[in-house]
């Protein structure tokens, strides 16, 4: 029996559940086709979008896409929903909500106040009705500011995660990449390493390397070793200098369990990091990464489309007040986002939806070598996200991660984006770059006598 139906041309299309309607209204992507949730045709997709536009936003509080009784992410979403914050849009349909978001009068303070009243399903639904330019405009309106040793997300600022990965975790190789990135003015978001070996000793070695560098040169930034959260807890218990705790997260309890995590485990890790009191200007101590397709690859999507699952992961992130949330948009591969067009669309969706939910969204503008995408596609997405107010991007030596084996953005790319859009690094980091004679007024300086101030210290780090 159908709950929603409409005619497109001479054909009547019917949809039996809100879950089916959401999935079939989603712009085409290979992961949904693989999972069997996608619309059978463009015509059916349009019909689903027409029906979805008339769905009341409030219905998402009662018609739960993943059962409350069996999923702790659903329980988190419902139990923390702020009905007072929701009140300004409570009487709107999904289509009406899109119109409300695009109004001139809808501004950053209003969206900040609204965020606790929105559920991921509401936000995912409205994004399915939005064009790319809609996603850019709404994302640009949202401002989410966080802080640890510097302040991220301020207007007119673009931060960069310095990503100095190495296939064998060689300290000298990593140190060389860190130095290279700092000399290009990257690293204000975080100096973050994906370790080749997820072990406590490996994590401690890398943490102490970065910590010594940050302390010696008084760099206003933070470090993170992207090991599993349980590794980070063990490292903290052993006295390691942990700034940020990392974890990849997803949008369902079952998928998170496949990652070896629960909400209570994340809460334990956050409490441990807060107890170290290592922040100087703020206490946002968590760094999360997400990506469309993770629930599908774990066979834990409950019949949902991959984008709705992705946005549910943002509810998990929101509960722990992170410094950074990074959608690694093209990393999982063409099985989920087939080509440059799908990657670009997903990146804009993720950024907009995360910002609407109150998250400090960045994006790893990336692709794998077997996807139908290239660096021109990434340049396009990078530019669009810059216009949309993305909090941070990646800085990878040569844009080619030699440990993870995928293509991302380079140290140079931040200069392109900052220059073309008039953006600057985080304010504390910008001051440090000028103090170290690396940059002034947003421009990189040539070395004096062949050296920057960062290279003047003869003692190696």
Image: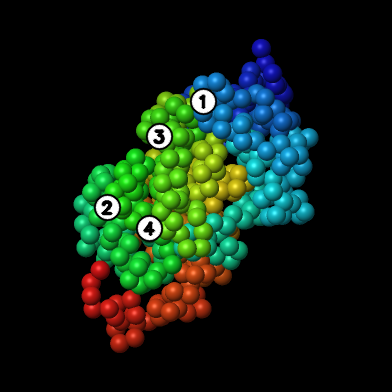
Name the secondary structure under disc 1.
loop
Left or right of 3, for residue 184: left
Can you tell which quarter of the image residue 260 is in?
top left
Left or right of 240, for residue 137: right
The residue at 29%/83% (across/down) is: 450
Query: Which residue is denoted by mark 1 in the rendering?
Result: 71
Crowd around label 1: few <14 · some 14–19 · many ≥20 (10 Å): some
Report the Cα–Cα distance between label 1 and label 3. 13 Å
Look at the image and tell me whether residue 381 can be seen. no
Report the Cα–Cα distance between label 2 and label 1. 34 Å
x and y percentages locating residue 390 in the rendered image: 54, 56
Lower sequence index among marks 1 and 3: 1
Crowd around label 4: few <14 · some 14–19 · many ≥20 (10 Å): many
x and y percentages locating residue 353 in the rendered image: 59, 44
Lower sequence index among marks 2 and 3: 2
Report the Cα–Cα distance between label 4 and label 1. 33 Å
Lower sequence index among marks 4 and 1: 1
In this view, the residue farthest toward the bottom is 449
Lower sequence index among marks 3 and 4: 4
Query: Which residue is denoted by mark 3 in the rendering?
Result: 261
Crowd around label 2: few <14 · some 14–19 · many ≥20 (10 Å): many
Indicate which disc residue 223 carries: 4
The residue at 55%/65% (across/down) is: 157
> Height in image: 32 above or below 396?
above
Can you tell which quarter of the image residue 65 is in?
top right
Lower sequence index among marks 2 and 1: 1
Name the secondary structure under disc 4.
strand
Residue sitting nearer the eye, 296 or 176: 176
């Amino acid at each position: 029996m159908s709950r929603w139906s409409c005619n497109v041309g001479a054909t009547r299309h019917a949809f039996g559940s809100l879950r089916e309607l959401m999935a079939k209204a989603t712009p085409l992507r290979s992961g949904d086709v693989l999972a069997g949730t996608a619309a059978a045709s463009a015509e059916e997709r349009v019909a689903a979008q027409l029906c979805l536009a008339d769905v009341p936003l409030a219905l998402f509080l009662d018609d739960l896409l993943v059962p409350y009784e069996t999923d702790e992410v659903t329980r988190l979403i419902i139990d923390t929903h702020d009905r007072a914050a929701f009140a300004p849009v409570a009487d709107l349909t999904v289509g009406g909500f899109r119109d409300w978001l695009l109004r001139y009068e809808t501004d950053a303070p209003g969206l900040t106040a609204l965020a606790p009243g929105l559920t991921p399903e509401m936000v995912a639904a409205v994004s399915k009705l939005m064009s790319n330019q809609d996603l850019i405009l709404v994302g640009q309106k949202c401002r989410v500011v966080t802080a640890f040793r510097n302040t991220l997300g301020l207007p007119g600022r673009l931060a960069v995660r310095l990503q100095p990965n190495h296939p064998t975790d060689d300290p000298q190789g990593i140190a060389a990449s860190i130095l290279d990135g700092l000399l290009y003015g990257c690293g204000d978001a975080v100096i973050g390493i994906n370790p080749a070996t997820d072990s406590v000793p490996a994590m401690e070695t890398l943490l102490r390397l970065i910590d010594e560098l940050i302390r010696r040169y008084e760099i206003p930034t933070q470090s993170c070793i992207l090991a599993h959260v349980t590794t980070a807890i063990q490292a903290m218990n052993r006295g390691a200098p942990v700034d940020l705790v990392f974890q990849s997260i997803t949008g369902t309890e079952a998928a998170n369990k496949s990652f070896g995590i629960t909400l209570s485990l994340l809460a334990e890790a956050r409490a441990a990091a807060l107890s170290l009191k290592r922040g100087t200007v703020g206490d946002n101590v968590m760094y999360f990464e997400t990506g469309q397709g993770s629930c599908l690859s774990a066979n834990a999507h409950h019949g949902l489309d991959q984008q709705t699952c992705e946005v549910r992961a943002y509810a998990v992130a929101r509960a722990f007040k992170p410094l950074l949330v990074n959608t690694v948009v093209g990393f999982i591969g063409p099985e989920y986002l087939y080509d440059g067009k799908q990657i670009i669309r997903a990146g804009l969706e993720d950024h907009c939806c995360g910002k609407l939910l109150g998250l400090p969204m960045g994006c790893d503008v990336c692709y794998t070598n077997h996807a139908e995408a290239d660096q021109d596609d990434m340049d396009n997405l990078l530019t669009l996200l810059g216009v949309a107010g993305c909090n941070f991007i990646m800085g990878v030596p040569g844009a080619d991660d030699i440990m993870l084996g995928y293509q991302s953005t380079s140290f140079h790319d931040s200069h392109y984006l900052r220059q073309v859009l008039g953006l600057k690094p985080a304010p504390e980091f910008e001051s440090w770059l000028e103090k170290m004679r690396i940059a002034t007024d947003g421009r990189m300086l040539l070395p004096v006598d062949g050296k920057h101030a960062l290279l003047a210290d003869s003692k190696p780090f």
